Every structure is written in structure tokens, then in C-alpha cells.
Image (cartoon, grey):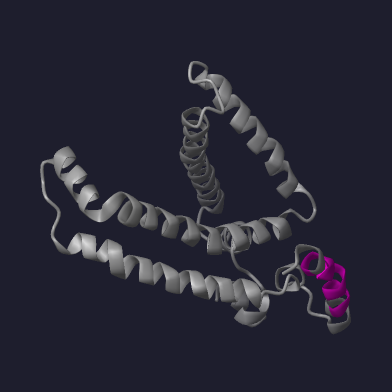
Amino acid sequence: GFLSHQSGVAVEKLGLGGIEMAFVAYPTAVTHLPVAPLWSALFFIMLVSLGVSCQFGLTETVVDGMVEGGFAPSNRRWVNVAVVCGLSWVLGLFFCTGGGLFYADLVDYYAFSLGIFLIVLAEIAGTTIWYGAKKLVEDLRLLTGRRLPDWFPWMWISVTPLSLLAITGMSLYSVATYEPHAIACRHRSDGVVTESCKRAVQWYRDVGGF
């Protein structure tokens, strides 16, 4: 609303969303606060801290999976961490190019709008169906010394999977009706330029099969 008022452009035509909310909308708003340099520094320190803390969890997950799966030696953890961080850094350079925001939006769209729900659905199925909800409740009782309420297993078996299936279905529908130029060309307001941009990114749908 603030950017819309300052620029005289309707909110729906600003084309801000996802990553640009953090790197365009909020920084612009922060610059208009009292003592703007202080709030700007604090804002970007917050972003760096958030990124580093997320990287700890992601790196630990990948490294532990490699070690437990036998794909990496367990006695040289620092080497495993260095390799994972190095590869992540190299892959991250791809998003620093001129089209980096476009590709970051694509990864965010496909990896986090659909992939996360499929992963959680698989985890729920693995723990409640294959391993067994009753065994899981008993294991938690042995670990914590407290028994979970009786309605917990029923939530795991019924409500949670059905909710995830519904969300996954909506995500699949969104992916099926997704147009690549919705992200790549959203800043173009000229009709002629927009059509040119649509043709330029149509290869993505054709090559990707979406």
C-alpha cells in the first residue's frame, strides 16, 4: 500500500511478491523510517542471520543423510560439510546472474509450493502406515515418560493426510495451470513487450513439458 501510494500505481500492478517482498518492498519502506540507515542495517543483518541459521539446518540434514546412507565417510565431518557448502555456493552463483530472480522464483514455486507437501505426506505415510501409529505413540511414551492423548494417532491417520492431500491437489492444479511468463514478464506493462516476453520464455514450457 505504501509503495502504491508513493508511486501512484495500483497494488495489483506493482508485481511484487516472493523474493521481491524482501529485497524491494521492505527495503523501500525502511528507507522512509526515521534514522533510516540504522533500520536498513538492522534489516539486512536480520536477513543474513536468517539465511545463515537456515543454512545450518539444511547443511546438517544433507551431511547426516550422506553419512548415514554410506555416501560419505563419518570420520571426516568437516570435509563433508566443506563439500556440501562449496557445492551450494557454486549452485547459488546461478541466482546472482541477470535472470537470477526469475530462476529463484521458479525454484521457490516448484520446490516449496509442491515439493514440501509431497515430502511431508510421504513422512506421514511412513510413520503412521508403515511404521505404525501405535508403535510411534509407544516409542514417544518410552522416550518422554508421558502418554499422548488418544486422539493424536487418529489425527495422524485421518485429518493430517487428508489435509495434505487437499493442499497437494491444489498445488498440482496450480502447477498444471502455471504460465512461465507470469513470473518472467510480470514487470512488463507494454502489451507489445509483454507478448515478446511471452514468446521468449515459451521454450521453458515446451522443453520442460509443463
**In the image, residue 197 lies at what x, y percent?**
84, 72
Q: Nearer the viewer, residue 82 or 19?
A: 82
**In the image, residue 137 lies at what x, y percent?**
19, 50
Q: Residue furthest left?
A: 146
Question: Which residue sits at x=38%, y=71%?
Answer: 163
- In the picture, which quadrant includes the C terminus? bottom right
**In the image, residue 124 lies at what x, y percent?**
37, 57
Q: Nearer the viewer, residue 102 or 170?
A: 170
Question: Which residue sits at x=73%, y=70%?
Answer: 180
Left or right of residue 144, residue 76 in this image? right
Question: Which residue sits at x=54%, y=71%?
Answer: 171
Q: Residue furthest top?
A: 75
User: Splitting the image into 4 quarters, where does residue 128 fall?
Assistant: bottom left
Q: Nearer the viewer, residue 100 or 6?
A: 100
Q: Which stretch did the figure color magenta?
A: 195-205
Would you place residue 181 above or below residue 118 in this image? below
User: Splitting the image into 4 quarters, where does residue 153 fall?
Assistant: bottom left
* Number of callouts: 0
**In the image, residue 106 lies at what x, y percent?**
67, 61
Residue 61 within the segment the image draws in magenta: no
- In the picture, which quadrant includes the N terminus? bottom right
Magenta region's main secondary structure? helix
Is residue 28 visible from the viewing direction of this image?
no
User: Splitting the image into 4 quarters, where does residue 158 fall?
Assistant: bottom left
Q: Residue furthest front?
A: 130
Would you place residue 100 above or below residue 164 in this image? above
Q: Nearer the viewer, residue 45 or 143?
A: 143
Is residue 142 visible from the viewing direction of this image?
yes
